[in-house]
């Protein structure tokens, strides 16, 4: 078997992204290059524009400028069309169906997405993509449990699993570890690196200790602009970042 070629065009490129709400400019010329195989953290004070960047990349806020994934324009497309291109997101509050089982949630994510490959069923009734996603996010043993009984952390993992079922290649995660136990945080950090090997992961996060442990690349936003981008060491050493964000 020959190894698969690494696709060099498989990345998300953002240039001069701007988002305004009336006269207020929330995102003011943001540039990001998000490579496959990297866990990229987006940090910055409240109101810096982190969520709005994700909203613009997923069709929930009207962005101007350039944002492409795999050579396809994202701006101006519907959320559904962007998801079909392989760009998926989670929200700060998990949007799972509490009355349905973990299996049903994963199954519905696949059906809703309607990617041809995820629709055929294996003989035992669980689609391959669903079984693989459940395994990847550590929920295989809970497939028949209602999502409503899951812990906060498990719900976030289920949401990530739902993106995997949809074959998302870019995952934009808005504060996935907020409210998680220390154990769940560690499990999530490891999960991100596991699934991030073949995907592009972007995480909005406030907990700088978590960022330090799990970031390949950190971008600091401040007042809608990129203040600095690089490794955690580079970010920490940046005087501007120290001044406006890391404090003393
Ligand atoms: P962050 O995620 O970094 O905390 P946000 O992206 O949520 O910041 O918000 C950036 C700025 O844009 C904030 O000042 C916020 O109040 C404003 N904002 C976000 N969404 C809207 C909206 N729908 N209408 C008006 N202002 C908004």
Image (spheres, rainbow, N blue to C red):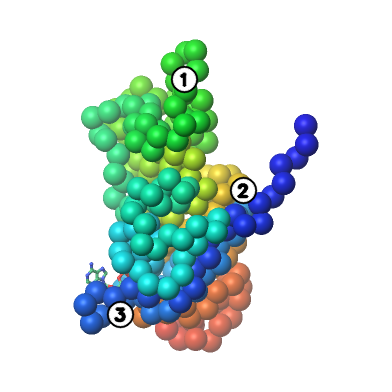
**Residue 188 in view of the camera:** no
Residue at horizontal 31%, vertical 46%?
A: 94
Q: Position of residue 79 (x, y in %)?
A: 34, 52
Q: Secondary structure at mark 3?
A: strand
Label 2 to label 1: alpha-carbon separation: 26 Å
> Residue 43 falls in which quadrant of the image?
bottom left
Q: Say which residue label 3 marks.
A: 25
Closer to the camera: disc 2 or disc 3?
Answer: 3
Label 2 to label 3: alpha-carbon separation: 35 Å
Q: Earlier in the sequence, mark 2 or mark 1?
A: 1
Disc 3: residue Cβ within 8 A of ligand 1's nearest atom: no
Rate crowding at label 3 as few (under 14), some (14 to 19) or many (20 or more) other CA atoms within 10 Å: some
Q: Secondary structure at mark 2?
A: loop
Q: Secondary structure at mark 1?
A: loop
Residue at horizontal 55%, vertical 74%?
A: 229
Q: Position of residue 138 (x, y in %)?
A: 48, 34
CB under 8 Å between callouts 2 and 1? no
CB under 8 Å between callouts 2 and 3? no
> Residue 154 falls in which quadrant of the image?
top left
Q: Say which residue label 2 marks.
A: 197
Label 1 to label 3: alpha-carbon separation: 47 Å
Q: Say which residue label 1 marks.
A: 121
Write down which quadrant ligand 1 falls in: bottom left
**Residue 204 in view of the camera:** yes
């Amino acid at each position: 078997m020959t190894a698969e070629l690494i696709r060099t065009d498989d990345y998300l490129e953002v240039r001069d992204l701007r988002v305004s709400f009336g006269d207020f400019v929330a995102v003011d010329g943001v540039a990001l290059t998000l490579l496959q195989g990297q866990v990229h953290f987006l940090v910055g004070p409240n109101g810096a524009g982190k969520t709005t960047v994700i909203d613009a990349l997923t069709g929930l806020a009207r962005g101007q400028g350039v944002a492409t994934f795999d050579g396809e324009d994202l701006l101006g497309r519907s959320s559904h069309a962007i998801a079909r291109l392989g760009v998926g997101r989670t929200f700060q509050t998990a949007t799972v169906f509490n009355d349905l089982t973990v299996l049903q949630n994963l199954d519905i994510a696949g059906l809703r997405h309607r990617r041809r490959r995820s629709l055929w069923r294996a003989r035992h009734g669980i689609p391959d993509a669903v079984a693989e996603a459940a395994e990847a996010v550590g929920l295989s043993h809970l497939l028949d449990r209602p999502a409503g009984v899951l812990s906060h952390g498990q719900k976030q993992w289920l949401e990530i699993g739902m993106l995997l079922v949809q074959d998302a290649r870019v995952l934009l995660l808005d504060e996935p570890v907020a409210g998680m136990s220390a154990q769940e945080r560690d499990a999530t950090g490891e999960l991100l690196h596991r699934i991030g090997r073949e995907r592009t992961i972007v995480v909005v996060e406030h907990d700088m200790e978590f960022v330090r442990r799990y970031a390949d690349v950190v971008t600091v936003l401040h007042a809608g602009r990129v203040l600095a981008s690089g490794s955690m060491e580079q970010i920490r050493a940046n005087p501007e970042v120290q001044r406006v964000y890391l404090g003393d």
